[in-house]
Amino acid sequence: MASIFRSDLLAGRVALVTGGGSGIGRGIAEAFVAHGARVGIVGRNAERLEGAAAAMGGSCLAAPADVRDPKAVEAALDAVTARFGPIDIVVNSAAGNFLAPAAALSPNGFRTVMDIDANGTFNVCRAAFDRSLRDRGGVVLNISATLHYAATPLQIHASAAKAAVDAITRTLAVEWGPLGVRVVGLAPGPIEGTEGMSRLSSDETRERVIAAIPLRRFGRIDEMAAAALFLVSEGASYVSGETLVADGAAWLGTSAQWMG
Ligand code: HXC
Ligand code: NAP
């Protein structure tokens, strides 16, 4: 999909994208670079991260870190700041997920997903606030999901984690708004060609899942990147505390079953 945005939309801006080495986070990082930003990408797998950064050219820096480790997060932010300058835009896309019935999920399994998604998001927001957002303002974009809007079986850990992420989005929007920081969220539906989709669906369930989506298809990474570009841009300058659902009306669509 050709971008509808000006190619210099993010010129002069510095962004940090966790989970930027793959999937939706990588798509967002690529879109930011294509629109003029310099971008640091964070993940645990340094080799994959370096590969993604190299593909994006000199405007992208790999900054390996586990978002569960506040010190490692701080070091990653410092590395990006040293290379590109203070960070204006933070995207929290790092997450962990798998299918597991609550009755079979170990406490450590639950904790691990909470730790990556919720604590990780807080750690990154907190470190970016100290380093630049407090003094310069900026935008935080938290990648959420719709799992917890109703209830999603086999997803108690990820649902609880994304509910926490949404609470972080709203709370920080209120606390940091007076300092010129917008905090927004993006809740994708099922996005084709991602790790998340491959973990949560199969060839067997594919047609059934599509039939329950009012737009009758999965979403695409470039569509999530376009939504992210809008949310971090001046076009969304009065949007804060809100999470944009980009899911083809999927979470509303259970009634689609009645339509045949
Ligand atoms: C049950 C599992 C499990 C599984 C791990 N665990 N996988 N339990 N079913 N399939 C348990 C382990 O047994 C362990 O508990 C605990 O979780 C921690 O596992 P580790 O492997 O030690 O964790 P770690 O190495 O930190 O890896 C984290 C991870 C892993 C989440 C488990 O899958 C990961 O790194 N994922 C990152 C990529 C990813 O998940 N991408 C998808 C994001 S998509 P015990 O008790 O044994 O110690 C997404 C979609 C949302 O979020 C919505 C879509 C619609
Ligand atoms: P993905 O490619 O697996 O993205 C997750 C990223 O997070 C990976 O790059 C991973 O890199 C990184 N990560 C995981 N644990 C980390 C940790 N502890 N520290 C640092 N980085 C970590 O999956 P995706 O499907 O594109 O998901 C991206 C985001 O979209 C997630 O927030 C997910 O919840 C959300 N989402 C996805 C869908 C979907 O359909 N795919 C739907 C709704 C919401 P490393 O392994 O290198 O650490």
Image (tube, rainbow, N blue to C red):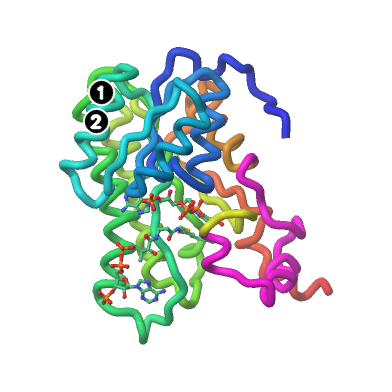
What is the number of the mark on residue 132? Answer: 1
Say whether marks 2 and 1 touch (CB < 8 Å). Answer: yes
Percent of width and height locating residue 54: 47, 30
- For the record, the magenta segment spans 196-222
195 or 235, which lies in front?
195
Element type where label 2 sits in the image: helix
| Depicted 126 relative to depicted 144: above or below | above
Q: Say whether residue 226 is magenta.
A: no
Element type where label 1 sits in the image: helix
Q: In the drawing, does residue 250 fall left or right of residue 95?
A: right
| Depicted 260 relative to depicted 227: above or below | below
Percent of width and height locating residue 214: 74, 60
Percent of width and height locating residue 78: 22, 27
Question: Splitting the image into 4 quarters, where does residue 249 fall?
Answer: bottom right
Q: How many C-alpha atoms fall within 10 Å of the one at disc 2: few (<14), some, or many (≥20)?
A: many
Q: Which residue is mark 2?
A: 129
Residue at x-position 27% and y-position 43%: 65
Q: In the drawing, does residue 93 fall left or right of residue 167?
A: right
Question: Splitting the image into 4 quarters, where does residue 170 fall?
Answer: top left
Q: Is residue 241 visible?
A: no
Q: Three-letter amino acid code at disc 1? A: Ser
